[in-house]
Image (spheres, rainbow, N blue to C red):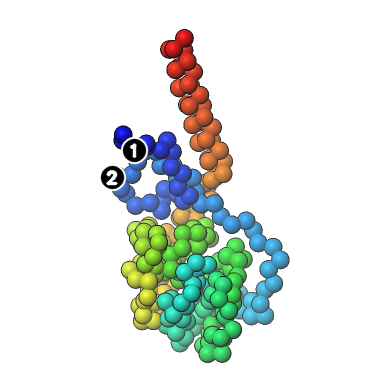
Amino acid sequence: MPPKIVDAYLQTTVAGFEYPRRDLPATIRFVGPILAPPSSGFERPAWWGELDNARPVVHVTQGTLDNADLRRLLEPTIEALAGDDLLVVATTGGPDPGPLRSGLPANARLERFIPHDVLLPHVDVMVTNGGYGGVQQALANGVPLVVAGDSEDKPEVAARVQWSGAGINLHTGRPSPAMVARAVRRVLGRSSYRRRARALRAEIAASDPLGTIGNVLTELCAVNDAVHQAGRAESA
C-alpha cells in the first residue's frame, strides 16, 4: 500500500524563508510563524539603559534546549567580541549564569533569560545555534543572524538564513571565537543583511498564521464533506 499523502502541511514561517526546491509538495502552506505572546512582569536588569546607547547590540543565545554546554557558542561569542565597541547581551536559557559572571568582559552582560519581545527591538545582530523559534522571533523583529548549529533541524535553519540573505551560516555547532568575530563584524558592516531581515519582517507582519490555519482546516473539512456526499449519492 502506498504511503498516504497529507492534504496540507502547515509550515510556520513565510515563503521568503524557504529556498527554491523542485521537490516541494504543493500541499505545503506557509502560514507565518506563531510567535510567543507578549511578555509581562519582566523585571529589567540594572544595566538595561545601556541598550539605548549608540554602540551596536549583539545578542547571543543557545536557546532553551541545547544549552547544557555553553562552551559551544555562548562563551566563544563573549570572548570573540570582548575588545569590540559594542554591547554583548548573553542569555543562558536555563543554566545558572552566576559562575560565568566573574570573568565577563566589560562589554558583556549575562542573564538567565530575557523575553525576546522585550530584547530584540534593541538588537543589531543575534548569534544563535539555530533554534527555529528563536530565529523566527529574530526575523519578526528584522534582526539579522549569525547561526552556528549542528543538531536537530538547526543545519537546515542555518541554510535558510544564509540563502535568504538575512545572516551568515557558520556550518558548525562549535565555532571558534575568530569565526564568530568575523561573522558578526561582517553582518554589522554590510547593510544588505539588515535589509533582507527587514524584508522578512514585513512578510511576517503581513501573515496571519492562526487565521490561515483556521481557513485551511475549514477548506479541508468542506472538501472532505463534499467527497462523502458524492460517495453517498453514488451508492444510493
**Residue 62 relative to residue 192: left or right:** right
**Name of the residue lying farthest toward the right:** 41
- Which residue matches tag 2? 22
Q: Residue at x 44, y 12 (%)?
A: 235
Q: Secondary structure at mark 2?
A: loop
Which badge, 1 or 2, comes first in the chain's sequence?
Answer: 1
Amino acid under disc 2: Arg
Q: Horizontal and vertical percent for residue 209?
A: 53, 45
**Residue 50 relative to residue 207: left or right:** right
**Residue 170 relative to residue 68: left or right:** left
**Name of the residue lying farthest toward the left:** 22
Question: Closer to the camera, 232 or 154?
Answer: 232
- Which residue matches tag 1? 3
Find residue 121 and report its image quarter: bottom right
50 lies above or below 227: below
Q: Is residue 126 visible?
A: no
Q: Residue at x 42, y 35 (%)?
A: 7
Q: Residue at x 64, y 80 (%)?
A: 47
Q: Horizontal and vertical percent for residue 236?
A: 47, 9
